[in-house]
Amino acid sequence: MNITIVGATGNVGRKIIEVLEKKNFPVDNLYFVASSKSAGSKLKFKGKEIEVENLETFDFSKAKITFFSAGGKISEKYIPLAAKYSTVIDNSSHFRMDPGVPLIVPQVNSKDLKNIKKNIIANPNCSTAQLVIVLKPLHDLFKIKRVVISTYQSTSGAGKAPMDELVEQTKLSLENKKINSKNFTKQIAFNAIPHIDVFVDEGYTKEEVKMIAETKKILDNKIEITATCVRIPVMVSHSESLNIEFEKPFTLEKIRDALENAEGCKVIDERKDGGYITPIEAEGKNETFISRIRIDSSNKNAINLWCVSDNLLRGAALNAVEIAEAFCNNS
């Protein structure tokens, strides 16, 4: 089939190209689309160079599936046009909470692909995507009552410029030179910033509100959720500390079994030095890794665990391509 990638030159766009190639996705013609600044440049797919086309003049009727990875404003402007001719898989937040647009993580709710009304499918926030893959098998067995989330999110979640700034600030800091932050509210090198996206109601940030609303839409609106999202000086991979309270009785053995057998999950949980997964080890991997599983000593109905996943893959590019695969299988 013919495929278009809007935002092909960006972090996620390039990862989508990588995933399509690794999965040997059935592509007849692949179209790379970006802003006028990038139009005319070339990207490779399976050893062949393909010229990037200008978004403003692109003909969306050429492709069956179009991936959008160019931000919310581009999605708002161009997806209604693209969706007239092509099924759109959008990585931005713009359509996620639209009741007429399914929000999909294939391992969790691929059945919702039957509810496509606008020819648009939304990809969730990267931190939500890895979260629901962990929660789904546990919710099926033990019915989750409440989740308390603390995230430790990499700079790649904010784009290429923030990643470059982390490198630049690290050098400046080691040289004891003055640092002026451009993409962050505070210095990111050797620091942690408890603030992702803009502030909204009651002191929460938009990133925290997105995680809560999206998880409820994908998994179960009755689950109580609260979140604190933190940016840390890591290049790739988001980590999450989860406190999960259940309604039904459970054992740690059953928790481990459920997670080990869940698609997209991998349990690495040894109670010894290094017996867990960190962001560097998760980079470039498809799985969501789960470690530090233990009973909450203050609440016998709850557990704590740590999960980490490559946000550019699991949280964006890989999930988008898996949506395309699920959509084709359901068509």
Image (cartoon, helix red, strand yellow):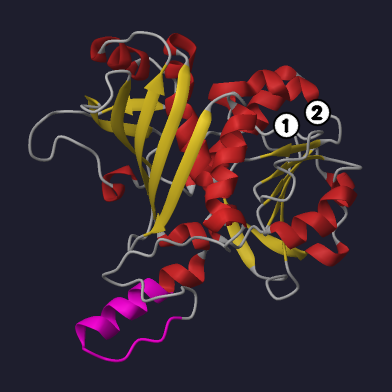
Quarter of the image where one finds residue 327: top right
**What residue is shown with label 1?**
102
Q: The magenta stretch spans which residues?
A: 165-181
The residue that appears at 47% across and 28% down in the rendered structure is 133
Q: Is residue 48 visible?
A: no
Query: How far apart are labels 2 and 1 at the CA level?
Result: 6 Å
User: In the rendered view, would you say 280 is above or below 9?
Assistant: above
Residue that label 2 marks: 116
Viewer-side residue, 107 vs 134: 134
In the rendered image, the vertical position of residue 252 relative to residue 64, given as above or below: above
Question: 159 or 19: which is nearer to us?
Answer: 159
Q: Amino acid at mark 1?
A: Pro
Q: Amino acid at mark 2?
A: Ile
Judge by depth and name the residue closer to the eye, 102 or 30: 102
Residue 169, position as x, y percentages in the image: 33, 79
Q: Residue 151 in the image: x percent, y percent? A: 39, 48
Which of disc 1 and disc 2 is earlier in sequence?
1
* Circle 2/circle 1 CB separation < 8 Å: yes
Q: Taking 68 as reference, is 232 left or right?
A: left
Q: Quadrant of the C terminus?
A: top right
Mark 1 crowd level (few <14, some 14–19, many ≥20, 10 Å Cα): many
Q: Is residue 94 visible?
A: yes
